[in-house]
Image (cartoon, rainbow, N blue to C red):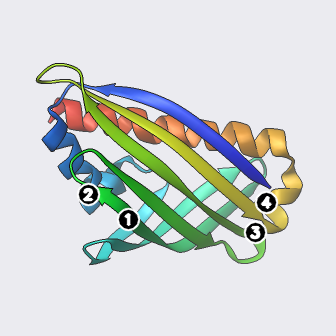
Amino acid sequence: MALVIEGEERIAAPLQKVWEALNDPEVLKATIPGCQSLEMTSPTEMTATVVVKIGPIKATFNGEVTLKNLNPPHSYTIQGEGKGGIAGFAKGGADVTLSEDGPDVTVLKYAAKADVGGKIAQLGSRLIESTSKKLAGQFFSSFGEKVGAA
């Protein structure tokens, strides 16, 4: 089952600072909902462990994240794939673009695509879609707060 999630976040920080934070595993770990660990294995690859609850199913996903199409400091594509044991799998990616709105405000736009399979996919598209949108929204708003406050 595939879904598309789009959104925008205004961040009270200069473009370069936001770009650096998007590439900082410590910032990402602190702002990804349910993230237990996130480690850089190369400048464009990370391994991650994330705990996600969708309806009655709580699953731990172990996966890999890759950064592609890098156009610093304006855009990149982040792709990931995780396996959650009997719960199933999730894979997807997001095109992230940054643009300046004055010297100290950055507009971050994202268009994410996700695909889930296994037991999680049986929960129904409405529940998965609403949870995915909520998690994406939580990540980008907490990312914006952390980077804007720093």
Label 4, residues with CA under 10 Å away: few <14, some 14-19, many ≥20: many
Precedes in sequence: disc 3 or disc 1: 1
Precedes in sequence: disc 2 or disc 3: 2
Amino acid type at image mark 3 = Ala
Mark nearer the viewer, 1 or 2: 1
Amino acid type at image mark 2 = Asn
Q: Quadrant of the C terminus?
A: top left
Q: Which residue is mark 4?
A: 120
Q: Residue furthest left?
A: 103
62 on left or right of 127:
left
Q: Nearer the viewer, residue 10 or 35?
A: 10
> What's the mark number on residue 87?
3
Amino acid type at image mark 1 = Leu
Cα gap from disc 1 to disc 4, whole angstroms: 26 Å
Cα gap from disc 2 to disc 4, whole angstroms: 29 Å
Residue 59 image point, x, y percent: 66, 64
> What's the mark number on residue 23?
2
Residues at marks 3 and 4 touching, judged by CB atoms closer than 8 Å: yes
Cα gap from disc 2 to disc 3, whole angstroms: 29 Å
Identify the residue at horizontal 62%, vertical 50% (top origin). Answer: 113
Amino acid type at image mark 4 = Ile
Identify the residue at horizontal 16%, vertical 19% (top origin). Answer: 102
> What's the mark number on residue 106?
none
